[in-house]
Image (cartoon, rainbow, N blue to C red):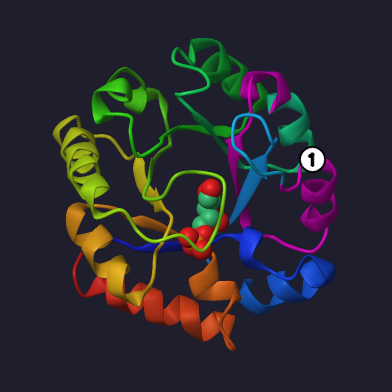
């Protein structure tokens, strides 16, 4: 299984975004962008204007994790800003049929996300329509939290579902990923690992990505 690393820009120095992105551009597989509205989650990060600005300095796949109320309303603007993949929470939109249709129309890849308390069953009806599914391994809203190991059983369920149905869907995990937890996530079946602190809070972010990938590959 090919392991992809998606550094989360949330942990970068926001006064030097282009420098932060340049440091990971060659080693990252995608750039994870956490959009938060202070309503769906108790934190506010950044939105379309920032995504549009950084689009000009990066060719990476922009993986946009939308933590807002009514995310479907923003799909068009996110796509226009440069999103390549948009993932939305099933806690915000239990039936994403409209969002799936809209994403298809806009030509962006689509995914669904579940928070730690939501069972994998909530995701089952939508996996086939998703290019990626995301299992949160922390409560959404903040970087730098501790990994919640209980979610690994949901990663296993997602991997089994994808493989059993012969799908190409990526299984992504987000939150508390370090060189210690990356191996456990990959062993459970995750092939896309988001890492904020473990990349951008390191002296050498490119080397940090390579270390995470190596740790995950050993267990995949
Ligand atoms: C949390 C975000 C994560 C966060 C991960 O709501 O979805 O993407 O940036 O940060 P770390 O890797 O530091 O846990
Ligand atoms: Zn995220």
Q: Residue 83 placed where, x, y %?
A: 67, 42
Residue drawn at x 61%, y 74% as measured from the top left: 24
- Asked whether residue 100 appears in the rendered view, the answer is yes
Q: Is mark 1 within 8 Å of ligand 2?
A: no
Residue drawn at x 44%, y 15% as measured from the top left: 94
Q: Residues within 10 Å of mark 1 (few under 14, many from 20)?
A: some
Q: Residue 71 placed where, x, y %?
A: 63, 24
Q: Quadrant of residue 125?
A: top left
Which residue is nearer to you in this view: 63 or 122? 122
**Magenta span includes 129:** no
Q: Which residue is mark 1?
A: 48
Q: Is residue 191 above or below residue 92?
A: below
**Magenta span includes 60:** yes
Circle 1 — which element? helix
Q: Is residue 1 above or below residue 108?
A: below
Residue drawn at x 50%, y 43% as measured from the top left: 140
84 left or right, relative to 175? right
Instruction: Please provide the residue range marked out in magenta.
Output: 45-74
Q: Is residue 209 above or below residue 151?
A: below
- Asked whether residue 6 appears in the rendered view, the answer is no
Say which quadrant the C terminus sits in: bottom left
89 left or right, relative to 156? right
Q: Quadrant of residue 210?
A: bottom left
Residue drawn at x 67%, y 25% as measured from the top left: 106
Which residue is nearer to you in this view: 150 or 129? 150
Residue ranking furthest to the bottom:
203
Say which quadrant the N terminus sits in: bottom left
Q: Residue 16 placed where, x, y %?
A: 81, 72
80 left or right, relative to 97? right
């Amino acid at each position: 299984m090919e392991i992809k690393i998606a550094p989360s820009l949330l942990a970068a120095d926001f006064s030097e975004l282009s420098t932060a992105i340049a440091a990971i551009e060659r080693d990252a597989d995608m750039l994870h962008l956490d959009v938060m509205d202070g309503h769906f989650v108790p934190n506010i990060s950044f939105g379309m204007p920032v995504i549009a600005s950084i689009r000009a300095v990066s060719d990476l796949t922009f993986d946009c994790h939308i933590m807002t109320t009514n995310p479907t309303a923003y799909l068009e603007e996110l796509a226009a800003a440069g999103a390549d993949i948009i993932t939305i929470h099933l806690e915000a939109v239990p039936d994403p049929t409209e969002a799936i249709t809209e994403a298809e129309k806009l030509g962006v890849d689509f995914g669904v996300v579940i928070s730690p308390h939501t069972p994998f069953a909530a995701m089952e009806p939508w996996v086939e329509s998703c290019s990626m599914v995301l299992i949160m391994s922390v409560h959404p809203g903040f970087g730098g939290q501790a990994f919640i190991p209980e979610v690994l059983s949901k990663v296993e369920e997602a991997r089994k579902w994808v493989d059993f149905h012969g799908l190409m869907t990526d299984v992504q995990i987000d939150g508390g990923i370090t060189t210690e937890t990356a191996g456990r996530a990959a062993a459970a079946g995750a092939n896309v690992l988001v890492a904020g602190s473990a990349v951008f809070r390191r002296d050498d972010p490119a080397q940090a990505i390579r270390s995470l990938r190596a740790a995950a590959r050993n267990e995949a």
